Image: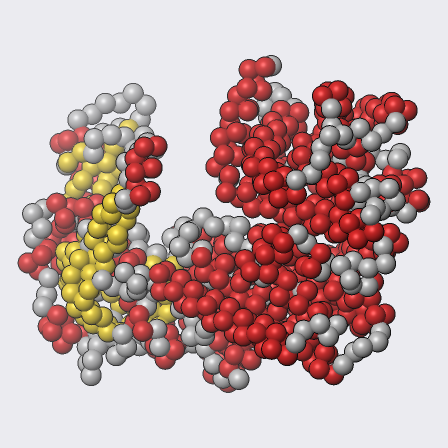
């Protein structure tokens, strides 16, 4: 089994390495939004001392941490797989005696992640030197405590996106549906602004949804801004969502493959 | 009157960066890049009269496409002159572009998502074809190619043959006087090929358009062209009648023979034998064209033949042969002036 | 006149195509409306926490959002679809056909695909600008509105020119498939006034990829913040950018046909 994964890794790493120039461009895409929000909110905080208790530095560290968390927990399954389902090339992968999503797609994700992360580091350092933020909130303990949250967060977005991708078995409009999900994620994940600044209704809903577990929770955790109760609550919620989304994914995937072979795409 | 196409010592040299494999070589070449000159076309001269259909032949990489691109104005030559209908192609004057067309069999001109009819309308606007003329041309093309049932469908839903019909129609809407066709029948089945061929012949007869055509299919060339121009390694190797060429270079046919299971026979008695069996498990015997009938009869009567077929020598082989036989073709290349006289007027 | 005929034929073809995919159009438009709602919500979140952003009030930011959406619509309606097509044509060699047509290649390369449904985007953008201007009230001058209109158009032209330059670079670096991603990425910075950004980011969006010239600057003119000589200077910049881009484009075409050798 390990051998299979190692082979997949070799192939996918080599493949991603071929696209490294493209990757840099995507990274530009990835970095600009958080940096813009960072600039906007620290400007607001600077002008009036703080925003609901958050100082300019608090905003800078929030968005800079978010940049890293985002790369670590995000998932590109839709872009790897949806077109394969639509043009029928998935059949080749279904013939293999391993689960296509839990092997090839997963490893492809990880290879992409490794390369983007490597490319992010120098950019992050440049931003750090430009902004000179104070990261004293972060402790060795908080980093250790966050590591499992990152894994859970990636697991959650992986299963969520894989389920979304499976919709491609039924409709060609999977990208449109994905866009609606993206709106939800913007609303509830804390990528625009720390959730505490969002309207109360949105905060209420957000705390039960999986979106904040992939971005907001790990970010706040590493910055030591959560109470112990919140940490426990969120970890429990993360485990629940991981299992729930995992189960949903397997059900949807199985039904989808059945349909795929019936249609003979 | 000048002819349709005049080419004088036309050359095209590409500069390609030269690099050895390996990282250190790559790093070195980053600072001091070495270039190598590749002659794609070397001092080629020929002339084509108005209304001629000329086959333009040569193995892959001989410089055919480069020449066609220069003649249609897409590429600047590194040396020499060309004159198409009195224009220098690479000046790309609108009047010039309106009087030629280029069709590349492997590349689609039509947009995949929309019906060909829409692309035609765009061409009408771009080429400034007035409505009456447009209707007339379209009707004529429809008559020859039976376009009506297919031009309303999105191009992606057409078969390869249907698509090629539309491609040709799109390329001819503006009534060009010179047609450059690069592999116009590639990938088509036999019927569709024949269809395109007879269309081109009829189009040439009706409009008096000049056609310069490359093809890998011998049938295209033999059916359409009386004259062929051959190039190899960028140099002109032959310019003359097609009958002369095949009579002189490859006056042979190939007989493919499959014997019944287990049967063995010495086939070399019948003619020169190909080294290996082809993919259908048959051996190919090369026989002088005039002996085909008698050799076939002998094969059938003397051996346990299961299956037998007769083929032309592939054009590639004829060309190969032309180039390998001490280059006699060079001597045959006719002086340009003479060629013009014979075919012009 | 000839070009106008070609352009109107292109529009006609694109409208027909849009009609053929009605369901997609409905989905696209509803998504557009949702995103606009989110954009407004985001602004209201900012302004429940502050009265002004870098000296700009809520109305002015709504107007800026409108301007941003206008540039974004140009991006989505024209730049993305045509770039995609250009890159494909470059890769499979069908660009040759475009270059053989007796019409300017630039016209055909940049206007063949038009995402017609994006007119909705234009309408929303204009509405936002009008609402924003009304909200900010006071101090509107004829000169201000006039220079706003001038600078907005020149900003769009600058953006278009940048795109053309990006496309032209593809003639030198064949595998330059992401030729416009960088434009889109930095365009995000046009949502907010460049004046709130730290100096380094302001430098990038003003001088390197001058998104701010198309977004922040026109609204500054509307606010009456710009002197007449500044307006003239920005218009001058537009002329220079256009001239340089066209030059790069022509050089790219020459490179493609091997004429510069």
Is B64 situated left or right of B119 in this image?
left
Number of marks in picture: 0
Q: Up-down: is A124 above or below C12?
A: above
Compared with B47, C34 (above or below) is above
Residue C19 visible in image:
no
Q: Can residue A117 be seen in this view?
A: yes
Residue positioned 28% across, 45% down in the render:
B33
> Residue A194, image x and y in percent?
81, 41
Quarter containing the C terminus of chain B: bottom left
Side of B158 where A207 appears, left or right: right
Q: Position of residue B249 (x, y in %)?
A: 13, 50
The quarter of the rendered structure image containing the N terminus of chain B is: bottom left
Residue C85: horizontal and vertical position, in percent?
53, 58
Foreground residue among C107 and B28: B28
**Residue that appears at 24% across and 74% down:** B83
Residue C164 vs A151, above or below: the answer is below
Q: Which of A169 and C98 is in front in this view?
A: C98
- Taking C56 as reference, is B323 left or right? left
* Residue nearest the observer in this picture, C189 or B217: C189
Q: Judge by depth and name the residue closer to the eye, A207 or C8.
A: A207
**Among the 4 quarters of the image, the one containing residue A58:** top right
Q: Residue at x 61, y 40 (%)?
A: A129
Q: Position of residue A228 (x, y in %)?
A: 88, 23
């Amino acid at each position: 089994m390990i051998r299979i994964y190692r082979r997949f890794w070799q192939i996918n790493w080599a493949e991603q390495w071929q696209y490294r120039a493209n990757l840099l461009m995507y990274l530009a895409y990835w970095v600009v939004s958080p940096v813009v929000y960072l600039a906007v909110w620290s400007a607001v905080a600077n002008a009036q001392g703080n925003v609901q208790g958050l100082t300019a530095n608090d905003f800078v560290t929030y968005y800079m941490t978010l940049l890293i968390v985002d790369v670590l927990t995000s998932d590109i399954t839709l872009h790897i797989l949806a077109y394969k389902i639509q043009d029928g090339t998935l059949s080749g992968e279904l013939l293999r005696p391993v689960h296509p999503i839990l092997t090839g797609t997963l490893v492809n994700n990880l290879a992409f992640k490794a390369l983007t992360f490597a490319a992010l580091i120098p950019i992050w350092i440049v931003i750090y030197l430009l902004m000179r933020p104070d990261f004293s909130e972060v402790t060795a303990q908080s980093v250790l405590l966050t590591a499992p949250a990152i894994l859970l967060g990636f697991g959650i977005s992986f299963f969520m996106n894989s389920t979304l991708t499976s919709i491609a078995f039924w409709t060609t409009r999977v990208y449109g549906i994905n866009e609606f999900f993206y709106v939800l994620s913007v609303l509830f994940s804390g990528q625009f602004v720390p959730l505490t600044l969002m309207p109360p209704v949105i905060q209420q809903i957000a705390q039960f949804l999986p979106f904040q577990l992939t971005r907001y929770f790990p970010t706040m955790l590493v910055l030591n801004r959560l109470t112990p109760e919140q940490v426990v609550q969120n970890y429990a919620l993360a485990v629940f969502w991981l299992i729930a989304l995992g189960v949903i994914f397997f059900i949807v995937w199985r039904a989808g493959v059945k349909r795929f072979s019936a249609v003979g795409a | 009157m000048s002819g349709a196409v005049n080419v004088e010592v036309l050359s095209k040299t590409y500069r390609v960066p030269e690099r050895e494999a390996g990282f250190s070589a790559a790093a070195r070449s980053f600072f001091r890049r070495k270039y190598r000159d590749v002659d794609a076309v070397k001092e080629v001269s020929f002339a084509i009269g108005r209304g001629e259909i000329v086959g333009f032949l040569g193995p892959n990489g001989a410089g055919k496409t480069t020449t066609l691109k220069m003649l249609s104005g897409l590429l600047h030559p590194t040396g020499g002159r060309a004159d198409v209908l009195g224009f220098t192609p690479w000046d790309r004057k609108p009047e010039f572009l309106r009087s030629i067309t280029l069709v590349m069999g492997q590349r689609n001109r039509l947009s995949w998502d929309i019906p060909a009819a829409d692309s035609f309308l765009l061409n009408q606007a771009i080429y400034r074809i007035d409505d009456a003329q447009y209707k007339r041309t379209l009707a004529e093309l429809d008559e020859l190619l039976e376009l009506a049932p297919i031009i309303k469908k999105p191009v992606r839903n057409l078969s390869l043959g249907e698509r090629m019909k539309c491609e040709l129609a799109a390329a001819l809407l503006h009534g060009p006087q010179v047609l450059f066709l690069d592999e116009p029948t590639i990938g088509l089945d036999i019927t569709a090929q024949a269809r395109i061929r007879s269309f081109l012949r009829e189009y040439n007869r009706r409009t008096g358009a000049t056609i310069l055509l490359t093809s890998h299919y011998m049938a295209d060339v033999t059916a359409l062209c009386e004259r062929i121009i051959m190039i190899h390694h960028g140099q002109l190797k032959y310019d003359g009648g097609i009958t002369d060429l095949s009579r002189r270079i490859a006056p042979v046919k190939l007989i493919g023979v499959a014997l019944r299971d287990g049967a063995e026979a010495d086939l070399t008695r019948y003619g020169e034998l190909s080294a290996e069996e082809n993919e259908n498990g048959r051996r190919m015997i090369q026989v002088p064209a005039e002996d085909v009938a008698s050799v076939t009869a002998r094969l059938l009567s003397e051996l346990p033949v299961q299956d037998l077929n007769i083929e032309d020598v592939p054009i590639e082989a004829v060309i190969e042969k032309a180039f390998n036989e001490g280059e006699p073709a060079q001597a045959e290349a006719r002086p340009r002036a003479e060629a013009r006289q014979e075919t012009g007027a | 006149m000839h070009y106008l005929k070609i352009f109107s034929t292109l529009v006609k073809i694109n409208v027909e195509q849009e009609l053929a995919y009605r369901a997609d159009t409905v989905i696209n438009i509803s998504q557009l409306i949702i995103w606009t709602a989110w954009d407004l919500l985001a602004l209201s979140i900012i302004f429940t926490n502050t009265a002004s952003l870098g000296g700009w009030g809520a109305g002015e930011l709504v107007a800026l959002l409108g301007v941003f959406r206008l540039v974004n619509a140009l991006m989505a309606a024209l730049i993305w679809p045509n770039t995609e097509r250009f890159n494909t044509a470059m890769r499979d060699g069908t660009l040759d056909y475009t270059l053989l047509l007796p019409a300017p290649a630039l016209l055909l390369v940049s206007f063949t695909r038009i995402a017609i449904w994006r007119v909705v985007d234009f309408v929303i953008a204009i509405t936002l600008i009008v609402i924003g201007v009304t909200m900010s009230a006071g101090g509107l001058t004829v000169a201000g509105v006039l220079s706003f209109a001038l600078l907005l158009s020149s900003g769009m032209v600058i953006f278009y020119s940048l795109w053309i330059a990006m496309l032209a670079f593809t003639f030198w670096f064949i595998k330059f498939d992401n030729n416009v991603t960088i434009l889109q990425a930095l365009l995000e910075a046009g949502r907010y006034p460049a004046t709130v950004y730290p100096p380094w980011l302001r430098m990038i969006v003003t001088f390197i990829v001058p998104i701010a010239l198309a977004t922040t600057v026109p609204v500054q003119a509307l606010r009456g913040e710009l002197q007449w000589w500044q307006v003239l200077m920005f218009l001058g910049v537009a002329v220079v950018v256009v001239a340089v881009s066209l030059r790069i484009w022509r050089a790219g075409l020459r490179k493609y046909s091997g004429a510069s050798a």
